[in-house]
Amino acid sequence: MLRIGQGYDVHRFADDDRTMVLGGVRMEGERGLLGHSDADAVAHAVTDALLAATGLGDIGQHFPDTDPRWKGADSMEMLAQVVAMLHERRCTVGNVDCTVVCERPRIAPHREEMQRRLTAVVGAPVTVKGRRAEGLGAIGRGEGVMCTAVALVDVP
Ligand code: MG
């Protein structure tokens, strides 16, 4: 049966010298996001979309932010673990599509690499689009980054 899942994540900018990581791509010189892990909002949204499509709960259940194991964790590793869980259940990912909403960083220069890295980990096409919030709300004021994702998964 084909099932769809939605993922959403938002992180505010950090005040320290963290580097931005989105879709597994380190963006040198770009202010990073606050989070228990590496705060990769794109990887988190994709992970949640895959978990949702397969009825396996959400990212907070599998990787609680109270667990020191995930402090500073590479979120692409967390995504890889979830993909492995799907494969154990003989689930096949059709594709994943993401929208990243932020004022900074500019997504376009990193889009291809983000898609390449996410596609490699997920094992199915992952597409990424960048959007701006046109000055509206917290994201529009440049206080953080928001990402949504949808995933289509063939679940036996
Ligand atoms: Mg997150």
Image: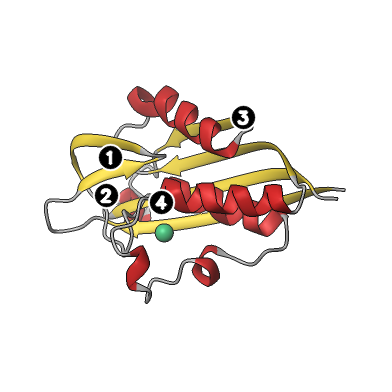
The residue type indicated by label 3 comes to Pro
- Badge 3 marks a residue whose secondary structure is loop
Q: Which residue is mark 2?
A: 142
Which residue is located at x 38 percent, y 74 percent?
67
- Badge 2 marks a residue whose secondary structure is loop
In whole angstroms, how far apart are the C-alphas of marks 3 and 4? 18 Å
Q: Is mark 4 within 8 Å of ligand 1?
A: yes
* Ligand 1 visible in quadrant: bottom left
Task: Give the numbered dot on residue 125.
Answer: 3
Q: Which residue is mark 1?
A: 104
Between 112 and 61, which is closer to the camera in this rendering? 61
Which residue is located at x 50 percent, y 69 percent?
60
Which residue is located at x 74 percent, y 49 percent?
4
In contact (CB < 8 Å): disc 2 and disc 1: yes
Q: Is residue 20 above or below residue 88?
A: above
Question: Seen from this angle, which residue lies furthest front?
Answer: 88
Q: Earlier in the sequence, mark 4 or mark 2?
A: 4
Q: Which residue is mark 4?
A: 75
- Badge 1 marks a residue whose secondary structure is loop
Q: Quadrant of residue 96?
A: top right
In whole angstroms, how far apart are the C-alphas of marks 4 and 2? 23 Å
Q: In the drawing, does residue 85 fall left or right of residue 92?
A: left
